[in-house]
Image: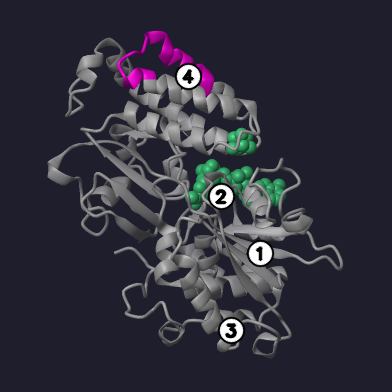
Amino acid sequence: MSKKLLLKDAHIEGIRYFDVYRKQGGYQAAEKALKMTPEEILEEVKTSGLRGRGGAGFPTGMKWSFLAKPEGIPRHLVVNADESEPGTFKDRYLMEHIPHILIEGIIIASYCLGSNASYIYIRGEYSWIPDILEAAIEEVRNAGFLGKNILGTGFDLEIYVQRGAGAYVCGEETALLESLEGKRGNPRLKPPFPAVKGLWERPTVVNNVESIAAVVPIINMTGAEYAKIGVGRSTGTKLISACGNINKPGVYEIDMTITVEEFIYSDEYCGGIPNGKRLKACIPGGSSVPILPANLLLKTIKGEPRYMNYESLSDGGFATGTMMGSGGFIVLDEDQSVVEHTMTLSRFYNHESCGQCTPCREGTGWLYRILKKIVNGEGEMKDIDLLWDIQRKIEGNTICPLGDAAAWPVAAAIRHFRDEFEYYVKTPELAKVKPFGLAHY
Ligand code: L3W
Ligand code: SF4
């Protein structure tokens, strides 16, 4: 049984409301933190080993320590709730069911960072969640945890909820800041990082919803105890949203010591693949991370089991590994077509490109059009090499990671499933026939 820190009370009726959350020990971490110094809180977060839960896995304590503190200039905390990565819906679950763990985390983080005005930027499509968050904020204000002179500490805090307008790229932290400032959400060049020049050019920390929520158990149990959960540099617990060809899609909290096999087949998690089908492939960290075929998913190239953590999933680099990413776990059974799946993703990235950089603006369109040509049975062998060339020219040559995110799925699909691309080219009429099984491998 995996240890639960964030979802431990998710089953309790009414946990969305302040009184019920408080009865379960809610806001004790905030009370504790407000008696500590900001430096002591930072030390706990650093000791915990918490890594950013939005996709990049950057150490949270280190990010907080980078925050510039020029005299007389306000600082901000911005929570990235723009969760738009295909396959990722864990922050939605957390905000819908336990909004107070996020609000409590914001209070602690804001106090630590010296932010008197903090923001939650939430994707526009989550249209019903801002009401939940705003109701929770109102309850917390009435209880004295928000506003002026919180609990008599002299610390003031306001939390604002801002809805996005439906652009995936606004999940990229600098595009998010542009959008929050009321402009078109175009990513900025980095450096400067937001920690130095962020919202309205002020020092800003941008953290994912789950990262901020994790600060609550860290303060409650201490960073050292949190660091004992998990393995290596994958400390604490991670929320995984599981979908695709599995019996039990949903959001699970894991402690990063379980194997991928256990996660897919155990009844505690995905419960196996429907109708006794075989596993073909999986994208474990949201659509941007490389797809892995079943053999490399269940074992690394060294023959060791593949674990659900940052290090094990990326073992072997992109040649034989992938990434933990946002934890959006997408499972494909033997009937799924990797080529068609890759085309769908390419259409998405092409549509979501902001158009600022040529390799991304033009390259994503080329990827989509060539993949569509292959799927429609009009592909030629040279198109597969052209796809490879185009993704190489995008990767690393753009302002923001959306370019890489568009390139990696294509690269991984060709690397691991080239024979399937060739099958489409050689036998276009057969490629249309379902089930499109493992048979031809
Ligand atoms: C100050 C330095 N700050 C790095 C900060 C930086 C950012 C964080 C990580 O995300 C991933 C990609 C996909 N001084 C710093 C510094 N920072 N050096 O650390 O930065 P970085 O550049 O490693 O990554 P990133 O741009 O934050 C890229 C994933 O995000 N992704 C997923 C998107 C969707 C979701 C979702 O729906 N939940 O996350 C898309 O690309 O895996 O690896 O804060 O400022 N010297
Ligand atoms: Fe815009 Fe794409 Fe360039 Fe990112 S990589 S800034 S989405 S054009």
Element type at mark 4: helix
Q: Residue at x 86, y 68 (%)?
A: 72
Q: CA distance from mark 3 to mark 1?
A: 18 Å
Ranked by sequence position, the earlier of labels 2 and 4 is 2
Q: Amino acid at mark 1?
A: Leu
Total numbered labels placed on residues in the image: 4
- The label on residue 388 is 4
Where does residue 29 sit, x and y in percent of width and height? 54, 79
Identify the amino acid type marked 2: Gly
Boundaries of the magenta span: 373-391
Q: Amino acid at mark 3?
A: Arg
Q: Which mark is residue 141?
A: 3
User: Hey, what amino acid is under mark 4?
Assistant: Trp
Q: Residues within 10 Å of mark 4 (few under 14, many from 20)?
A: some
- In this rendering, the answer to whether 2 lies above or below 41 is above
Dot 3 crowding, Cα within 10 Å, few <14, some 14–19, many 20+: some
Q: Quadrant of residue 266?
A: bottom left
Marks 1/2: CA–CA distance: 15 Å
**Cα distance in 3D space between marks 4 and 1:** 40 Å
The residue indicated by pointer 2 is: 171
Of labels 4 and 1, earlier in sequence is: 1
- The mark that comes first in sequence, 3 or 2, is 3
SS label for mark 3: helix
* C-alpha distance separating marks 2 and 4: 27 Å
Camera-side mark, 4 or 3: 3
Main secondary structure type of the part rendered in magenta: helix
- Measured as percent of width and height from the top left, residue 155 is found at 71, 81
Residue hosting label 1: 77
Q: Nearer the viewer, mark 3 or mark 1?
A: 3
